[in-house]
Amino acid sequence: MAAPVRLRIILGENNSQRLTLQDGIPETVDEIVQHIKRQCGVEAHFRLQFMDTEFDNEFTNLMSVSEIQDKSTLKLVFDPVVSVLPCGSQPPPASSPASSQSSNVSLSSGSLYDTDILSTPDSTSSRSTGWPLVFLVPRFPYDCELQLEKANAAFKESGTLLNPDIRLKTAILDSLAEAIVQYKVYPSDSEFEEVAEALVSSHPCLKEPGSATGYGGWKMSLKYKLANYRRKLKGLGCPEVELNSLTNKPADKCSPAYGVKKPRKAEVNYCPTYPSGESAETLVKMRETLLLEVRKKNNEGTVAAMMKKTFAHRRQEVIRDAPLIADFKTRWPALSVYV
């Protein structure tokens, strides 16, 4: 059994606390985060930095547990909180000369405030956060973790690198792909690089000999893995991927590279799935019912509930069809009531 480890946790200015890990240093940074949340009573999102002795004790982002030891100092850097708007809400638009011409502007991703929603209820695939400031490598299957633990020990002792077999590599890529799609289905090149770098930082035995970065091959493998994963999601009816399928593109521009719709930086639930038990047909009928309900007096509660229920359908309509704002407001007159 590993000896207990004590860490100094800096929670803020003039605010620090001792953290005791009875079973020694955990295997992942995420486990340390959970210990801090539990023992220090921290609920907000944060990332960790450690006091780096190689850089005059300046604080550096913690990417691997190998960077810390007994009596190390860690600092919490709290992530800024992103406000979550109620479904269908619309913040006051900024005044601009072009506002008077808004009815002639086509709707596209993020062009109507009603669609800039960070989370939606009743959806099992809803996301609650955007891309993390520090990507945490997930825990792999138990047998893979044992193999990597042994290989990391050999690397630390003699510098021996691991040449993973196809089974281990597939398990690693599958786990990383599942972790990535928790944030987005279409990561950027720099985000792929962050994941690959985090992987070799957490498991240095996986560094690639002869590579300038040590993770170039992992980065390319992740791109291919995500492409295959998207095909799987498309077959399962994931709307975020179906929107970009060739069947949903104009016949004269039927190219995989044409008009790929991706979330903007601040968007989390870019294209949510329909609520459980609902379909396009049922939500179309609900929209037609809304046209009648919105005319009734003292009916705000019913209208609000129906607008909340039809948000996913409304959002997909905006992304897929990019209608004019005037046309969209005609189809959804409850927007002016619900806001």
Image (cartoon, helix red, strand yellow):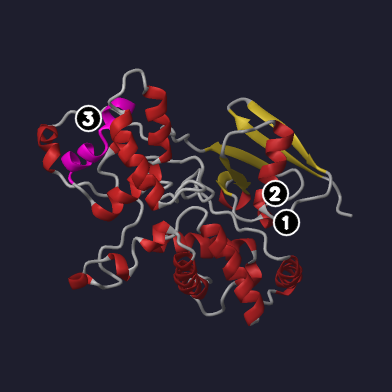
Instruction: Identify the amino acid type marked 2.
Output: Glu
Which residue position is annotated with label 3?
94
Q: Position of residue 181 (x, y in %)?
A: 50, 58
Note whether residue 165 is visible. Answer: yes
Upstream in sequence: badge 3 or badge 1: 1
Instruction: Identify the amino acid type marked 3.
Output: Ala
At 48% from the left and 34% from the top, the residue drawn is 81
Q: Nearer the viewer, residue 21 or 253?
A: 253
At 16% from the left and 39% from the top, the residue drawn is 326
3D distance between C-alphas at marks 1 and 2: 7 Å
Which quadrant of the view contains residue 84? Answer: top left
- State if disc 2 and disc 1 touch (CB < 8 Å): yes
| Disc 2 element | helix
From the viewer's perspective, is residue 9 above or below residue 131?
Answer: above
* Residue range corresponding to the magenta coloring: 324-339
Q: Which mark is residue 27?
A: 1
* Residue 5 belongs to magenta span: no
Q: Which mark is residue 31?
A: 2
User: Which corner quadrant holds the C terminus?
Assistant: top left
